Image (spheres, grey):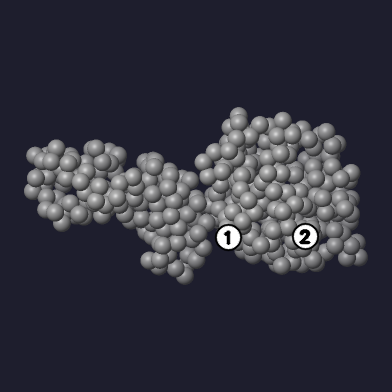
Amino acid sequence: MMAAIAAAEKGSSVCLLEPNERLGKKLNITGKGRCNVTNNCDLETFMRNVPRNGRFLYSAYAQFTSTDVMDFFERLGVPLKTERGERVFPVSDRAFDISGALEKRLRQLRVAIVRDRAQALLLREGVLCGVKGQREDCEASRVIVAAGGVSYPLTGSTGDGYRLAKSAGHTVQPPRGSLVPLCAEGVLCPRLQGLSLKNVALRVYENDKKIFSDFGEMLFTHFGVSGPMILSASAHMRKFGQKSYRLEIDLKPALDEEALDRRLVGDFAKHANSDFCNALDDLLPKKLIAPFVEMTGIDPREKVHDLTREQRRRVLGLLKALPVTITGPRPVEEAIVTSGGVTVKEVNPSTMESRLLEGLYFAGEVLDVDAYTGGFNLQIAWCTGHLAGVSAAG
């Protein structure tokens, strides 16, 4: 939609092929339906949050920054707000307001919206001349492939863009999930299924080296862990099969070890005559108590006044670093973003045009670029789409 708008604003006649019954189907589920439009940051911060081929995006971002994106949507009548971590959302908290504003602008610019799926590129003697659809052909001197990756296939991201790119001779890096829930070893997570932890701290270790930390919210599931912090962490875990990964959850991040030990001494004094398993109600969610007690190795029926200092230190250690061993990511279809895609060396970063086939352009998730959570992936969509549209129109 952004590419079509940018091209039409430059005076081009534009046709947008859309196989879904409505535009922006994937956009409407981003940010839990609120749509994290962009991140209100500078170029340096943006680059720091794009671990995969970030330098390729330098020109695209410079020409359509997060500030430009915010101005664009506010001009279209969507007031925006900036929240924690410089994340930008519609004031209404409705993703539909973003997709609706884009659709309204497309219609103002008389972009032809055709309900069809692109099947193949049309070539005559090696020259690009349009797209073959399921229903009919669309003649065009320029084609922009902005078909997404393979995550959330029910929204239309079914890998069509990769197929079209390969037909033009492009190399496609195998897609995998980025910003994806994680599978865990053992029975802890299934036992805690449905338990949401808020205001906890997370540390991620790759072969015992800390590679990521965060603070916020997470969720235990039947397969492992999910939630905002976990999705962010998954983007840093890129070597499954080569490296081992472990999470440590700090259940009491507001207290350092010394302060937490004082808290434990106080709590244990209050529950001195209770069984150990009944002395943790003030410290832990009810669902977590039984598994936690088992992990300490302390007899649940042992009286609190009989606990040794070493046992108390064991409890403290688990409160500050509850371990979860990660076995791998969930399938790419469950990922918010696809990592992998069209090799960026084969695309001109100043125009988004293919270096292999004149008149063919790429934008968004179909490219081998992806970012951390926080509005950065949508910023990639907006700025590459804008640059591809302007370049194709030129």
Residue at x-position 78% and y-position 35%? 105
Q: Which residue is mark 2?
A: 350
The answer to whether residue 284 shows anywhere in this view is yes
Residue 346 position in % (x across, y down)? 74, 66
The answer to whether residue 339 shows anywhere in this view is no
Report the front residue among 75 and 105.
Answer: 75
Report the front residue among 254 and 383.
Answer: 254
Residue at x-position 84% and y-position 53%? 392
- Three-letter residue code for mark 2: Ser
Residue at x-position 14% and y-position 37%? 270
CA distance separating discs 1 and 2: 20 Å
Residue at x-position 77% and y-position 32%? 104
Q: Which residue is mark 1?
A: 51
Residue 362 position in % (x across, y down)? 75, 56
Residue 45 position in % (x across, y down)? 59, 54
How many neighbours does mark 2 have within 10 angstroms: few (below 14), some (14-19), or many (20 or more)?
some
Quarter of the image containing the N terminus?
top right
For residue 142, the mark is: none
Query: Could you tell me which secondary element the residue under label 1 belongs to?
Result: loop
Query: Could you tell me which secondary element the residue under label 2 belongs to?
Result: loop
* Residue that extends furthest to the right in the rendered view of this protein: 125
